[in-house]
Amino acid sequence: MPELSGIGVSPGRAAGPVLRLAPPPSLPPPPAVVDAEAERAAVRAAVAAVAAELTRRADAAAEAAVAEVLRAQVLMATDEMLTDAADAAIEAGAAAPHALAAALAEHRAAFEAAGGYLAERVADLDDLRDRLVSACLGLPMPGIPSPGHPFILVARDLAPADTAGLDPAVVLGLVTAEGGPTSHTAILARMLGIPAVVRCVGVAGIADLTVVSVDGASGAVAVGLSPEEAAAVNAEAVARRARQSASSGPGRTADGHPVALLANIGSARDLTGEVEGVGLFRTELLYLDRADPPSEQEQVAAYAAVFAALPGRKVVVRTLDAGADKPLPFLRMADEPNPALGVRGLRVARRSPEVLSTQLAAVATAAAANTADVWVMAPMVATAAEAAEFAAACRAHGLPSAGVMIEVPAAALRAPAILRDVDFLSLGTNDLSQYTFAADRMAGDLAELLDPWQPALIALIAACAAAGLEAGKPVGVCGESAADPDFALVLTGLGISSLSMAPRSIPAVRESLAAHTLEECRRIAKAALAADTPQAARSVVRRASA
């Protein structure tokens, strides 16, 4: 049967008939505006309707990170700059839907020019435009089909509001023509446990109701399955999920080598089910979209909620990961020509040292009141001197386990020197890919360069793991690559000691590790390192692990 290929971003297999996301609304020819006040009122009514719908979805979201994405969209929709720009367009003679489309086009251009985190929000703005225009025209909001039976969803790309509302019992798999490994579609699909493939060339040519299978690990999309073949794919997937849900306990290879399987979370709400611990506590969710920073007391309460839920277990707290690429109003960051290469992460402490000191004090207070094993790490560390300064600040606040994230190639290359002063390393493979290959995380045309199976990235991971083994200090991976059951074998074979991922991904990784010995993982890692392309690395690892 014909087979298409893309980038697998959420492991698992599923099969079913294809259905497409409804197309965005088309703007009618511009009408003559006879009542500017009525058009302004229509803009505000559309904003209110869209904000109410997104708020409803955020309140219903099971995952805190999903809710935060949707609430960020609400803030975009209700931003006075948007309505002011729409009002200006109305004054120039535009009707309400055209005025909103023009205003959002301005925002979109500004976000794209800013790059980094803001460029990642362009899809959110496109979704807002479609929703606001639909509301103005009295059309149904764009959304997921409801055919009354399970299906494979195909789209150019998906907005967070669409992905967040997916029911895994109905939407069996996702295939998009655009997007990348770090897009909202990929991240939310992993959270929901839905197999997903992005950047699949040719998917637009598949007719509705054609039966396909989706392999979210390999990126393969087989077209034209028979009902019997589709049933076999889904039966195998159900059996695998049953095995995985029945599994429990710490991560170990077949011969008992421990590999801690930890969770990536944004708040205590994300702690679903039993986990060994937390490998990435994204504290910036507490800071986003606020005019003032959270008080020390607010922070203590938020951190203590997580620590209390994990008595005696490891919790790795990442200090504020924000800056010009993730603008926070209270930081008052200056505009930068390339925010991804500017003041972000730990670098913010140079300009606003009180933000870091307050956060460390709050973490220390919350840790002292609980029995969780609290570790603290800083993002965007580039030099050994930065790492040493951060470790000293942690210890001055009574936090004994201080580490850094390796997201910059310079830090990976100097891992032995960095480990002289810190207690552990954690690799953020999303940003490490971006900086290694000079490829914006949201540049869909460059998605292949952001593939974690790129041999150059694997080589940097190997260097950090070797440095950790030499120093006798742990090195973990908290990027989304850790959620790939096959790539987890490579990481284990390289010497990585912990893998942190969305909680739903842990059972599949646990099963994969349990089926291979440490020596087998080492052979698999050696084969991946020797490959010349990501495709070759995947292929050789699958053959070796079969």
Image (cartoon, rainbow, N blue to C red):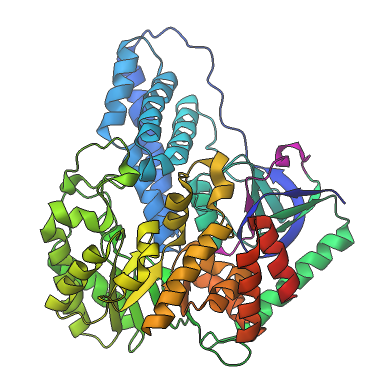
State the extent of the magenta-drawn residues as a range. Answer: 191-208
Whole-percent x, y for residue 207 in the image? 78, 39
Left or right, residue 366 beside residue 237: left
Q: In which quarter of the image is residue 532?
A: bottom right
Residue 8: x and y, percent? 63, 56
Q: Which residue is drawn at 28% across and 61% down?
A: 383
Number of disc labels: 0
Instruction: From the viewer's side, name the closer residue of 127 and 392.
Output: 392
In this view, 117 is above or below 41: below
Quarter residue 25 falls in: top right
Seen in the picture, residue 368 relative to 104 is either above or below; the reply is below
Against 108, residue 13 (above or below) is below
The reply to whether the magenta stretch includes residue 275 is no
Q: Does the magenta stretch include residue 206?
A: yes
Residue 417 position within the rendered picture, expressed as x and y whole percent measured from the top left? 30, 71
493 lies left or right of 424: right
Residue occupying the far bottom of the picture: 256
Query: Looking at the image, which is closer to me, 112 or 239?
Result: 112
Residue 474 appears in the rendering: no
The residue at 26%/37% (across/down) is 336
Q: Quadrant of the C terminus?
A: bottom right
- In front here: 407 or 43? 407
Q: What residue is at 59 percent from the left and 41 percent from the top?
A: 178
Residue 1, image x, y percentages: 88, 51
User: Can I make out residue 428 in this image?
Assistant: yes
